[in-house]
Amino acid sequence: MRVLLRPVLVPELGLVVLKPGRESMQVFHNTRVLVEPEPKSMRNLPSGVVPAVRQPLVEDKTLLPFFSDERVIRAAGGAGALSDWLLRHIKSCQWPHGDYHHSETVIHRYGTGAMVLCWHCDNQLRDQTSESLEQLAHQNLSAWMIDVIGHAISGTQERELS
């Protein structure tokens, strides 16, 4: 979580006071926080929680052949690393078309991508092909690639890649 706050300087005591709202307090439960000047791109944002960085490259369809290339997937850690990333970031079944979802999830490989499905949906979709499944697998593959690239470049996801 990132927050944008207005500091109150108390020069006589050498202190800076920050007054976060209730929704921003979570960031201060860490042992340390990073403080840096407000970037120009955030000048018009109100104080409080800052939206997560949007990565437009995830939605760029022209990058899909690159992201889907086996050599690129291997360089990013391989299909196993994609599965691990999905299990860390997605906690429930990604298939929206169904009345019942079991609490236990599995990785469902689809083409060069993958998705998190509950065991019930995995059994229903195992040998099926559809544009929806392909789109979901590609979306996960692209998001994982952008995450891996972001960490390799700067070690964080705080910057938008272009």
Image (cartoon, helix red, strand yellow):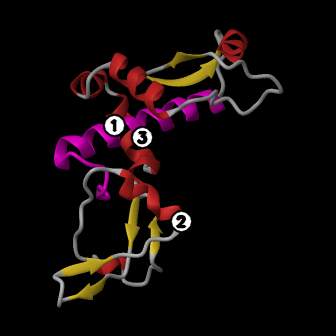
Q: Quadrant of residue 123?
A: top right
Circle 3 sits on which residue? 143
Q: Quadrant of residue 91?
A: top right
Label at residue 145: 1
The C terminus lies in quadrant: bottom left
Label at residue 22: 2
* Nearest to viewer (mark 3 / mark 2): 2
Q: Quadrant of residue 20?
A: bottom left
Q: Residue furthest right?
A: 99
Give the dominant element type of the magenta stretch: helix, strand or loop.
helix
Residue 110: x and y, percent? 52, 19
Residue 17: x and y, percent? 31, 78
Report the front residue among 128 and 2. 2
Question: Which residue does the image show at 65% across and 9% down from the upper left?
Answer: 127
Q: State which region is magenta.
A: 132-161
Label 1 near label 3: C-beta < 8 Å? Answer: yes
